[in-house]
Amino acid sequence: MHYVSVEGLTKSYGINPLFSNISFHINEGDKIALIARNGIGKSTLLRILTGKETPDSGKSWVHKDVTVALFEQDPQFEEAKSVLENIFELNHPIINAIKKYEVAIEEEDADGITEGIEAMDNLNAWDFETKVHQILDKLNIHHLTNPVKELSGGQRKRVALAKTLINIGFSHQHTLLMMDEPTNHLDVEMIEWLENYLNQEKVTLLLVSHDRYFLDAVCDEIWELEREKLYTYKGDYEQFMEQKAARLESEQASIDKAKNTYRKELEWMRKQPKARTTKSKSRQDNFYEVEARAKQKIEDTQLQLEVKMSRLGGKVVEMKKVYKSFNDLPILKGFEYTFSKGERVGIVGKNGVGKSTFLNMLQLIEPADSGKINVGDTVLFGNFSQQGLVIKEDMRVIEYVKTFAENFPLANGGSLSAAQFLELFLFTPDKQYTYLSALSGGEKKRLQLLTVLFRNPNFLILDEPTNDLDLPTLAVLENFLSDYPGCILIVSHDRYFMDRLVDHLFVFEGNGEIRDFPGNYTQYRIWQKDNEKLANKWDVLEAGKRKGATTESIVMNEQPKTAPSASASTKRALTFKEKREFEQLEKDMPELEKEKQSLTLEMSTGTLAFDAIQKISDRLIVITNQLEEKELRWLELSELV
């Protein structure tokens, strides 16, 4: 079934064309990622498909049975109304019943709760209510009766996402869900939950995102807006990069061929008399087509940064027994750490556990409650904060950059003017005279990054640097940071970005506890999930033993119930050697588990040197592998007991 058909769509802003004469179709079940550089028109295209903007020319058609839902980067709310009223804005009997029921629970209204239960029963709405609660819980949305105007930027994004997901659950059977950067302001667990949710729901998806792992998990086709055209690619992000490279190579070969033809035709044109025959007139017309083709340029613009970094001394930053809390919420409990030259540390944890506060404390912007934070004399912080650009008044891009410096020193001893430096950041001469207020969200982020690097810092602090940046800029930024000789501290929910750049993690586990994990984010999640599985197994064993059950019976109850096979009825008895092995396993596994818990507790103190952490981590890997082997062998033998 065709959901959307678009023919000859064209849109420009002033003299700047976004896309020209593009055509495409979206069919039921398609899951498409739309990517492009910032300012090319991704968000504009989504708004045209919803009817919120009009194209300059061309047609777009949406099937009459299809409901189009758009999640935007800057969601609009009725500010005076509550979170609940904004989320349940859709006028639907079940939505209305759930809204009344939730308000009654929030206000502890006994009569309202009774009426709500009756209404929910009559509408058979409990399945929907469960789904609504799952969405609200996973997105950490509480205090539903508070007005939206009191929410932070991240909370607003999560409320808007909840509203979108809940509403599509009550819309028509055929839904086209369009999402513009949905993972911004979500922590990693929320992003992973959203991946699973979108894969389970039967929705057709058009997605704009810079999160490459998210794209690969959710989409199977990529569209790219480039040089006013729309290119389509089947497969994941890696396959897209391969196919794009092949396309560019083919286009360049075609341009080179046109240049050779152009030189020959130009010579012929110069020799021709003014009076031309019909045949020569035809060749002349063809000449202008060849000329246009030959003068075409494929711009593979890249952000090339050669920063002259200020020298780092022997002392970088030392944190000794640092405590910090807000009211009853502990952020740090006696945290100790000494940063070394060239360290690359990632910071992960749920929203609200104090990651941004930690960054401010490190820069001495936020005071500690107790303890010492010693910053080396040569340390020059470069702080890329979530706050964004700080401007007192609207001004042109070039004027804003010149408020920091007229020239930028390079590593080779030369320098660049502010205008030249802006061009390296993909700001064309025309764009440099654009007012800041007219820039897209991604362009503002790129400009913010420029101003941070303009000061030549040797300790970069990047708080969610990937939000709103386009994928081409992200790729080049990653390459630059890979070669950056200074210290880097990154807070990011972009798993791909973290995996490429960090050597170890500070994991904010809540309640003031910080774990120093020796590895990147993917390695941490694997370790975390393995621990959760093992913890669940031992919980089952311990719970069963407290009730007086034998280890054998507990394991047998955990096995899938199947009909007895022929071999099951003729099981052999354990040999003497196997009995001894089985008894030894029951002694070894609790001892290994105890050692593992002890080492895990030791790692979480935050007082260990990096070498000690590495040693403990290696031992934990050995213990985990031994436990898995012993558990498998124990299960094999237990079936014969």
Image: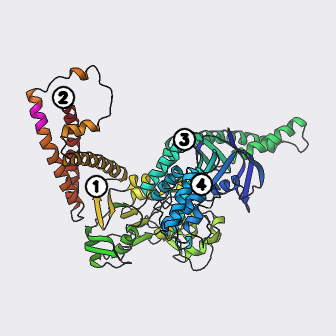
Using the rendered image of the protein, determine whether residue 449 is visible from the camera's viewpoint: no
Amino acid type assigned to the residue bearing label 4 in the image: Ile
How far is the residue under mark 2 from the one under mark 1?
41 Å
How far is the residue under mark 2 from the one under mark 3?
47 Å
Q: Residue 549 falls in which quadrant of the image?
A: top left
Q: SS class of the residue under badge 4?
A: helix
How far is the residue under mark 1 from the one under mark 3?
33 Å
Q: Residues within 10 Å of mark 4 (few under 14, many from 20)?
A: many
Q: Residues within 10 Å of mark 2 (few under 14, many from 20)?
A: some
- Sequence-wise, which precedes: disc 1 or disc 3? 3
- Sequence-wise, which precedes: disc 3 or disc 4? 4
Q: Nearer the viewer, residue 95 or 141?
A: 95
Residue occupied by mark 2:
640
Give the extent of the magenta segment.
579-583
Q: SS class of the residue under badge 1?
A: loop
Instruction: Check residue 518 in the rendering and tell me which mark sits there, or answer none.
Output: 1
Q: Nearer the viewer, residue 386 or 117?
A: 117
Q: SS class of the residue under badge 2?
A: loop
- Sequence-wise, which precedes: disc 2 or disc 3? 3
Residue occupied by mark 4:
94
Q: Quadrant of the N terminus?
A: top right
Residue 40 % position (x, y): 64, 56
Q: Nearer the viewer, residue 242 or 276?
A: 242
User: CB atoms at circles 3 and 4 under 8 Å apart?
Assistant: no
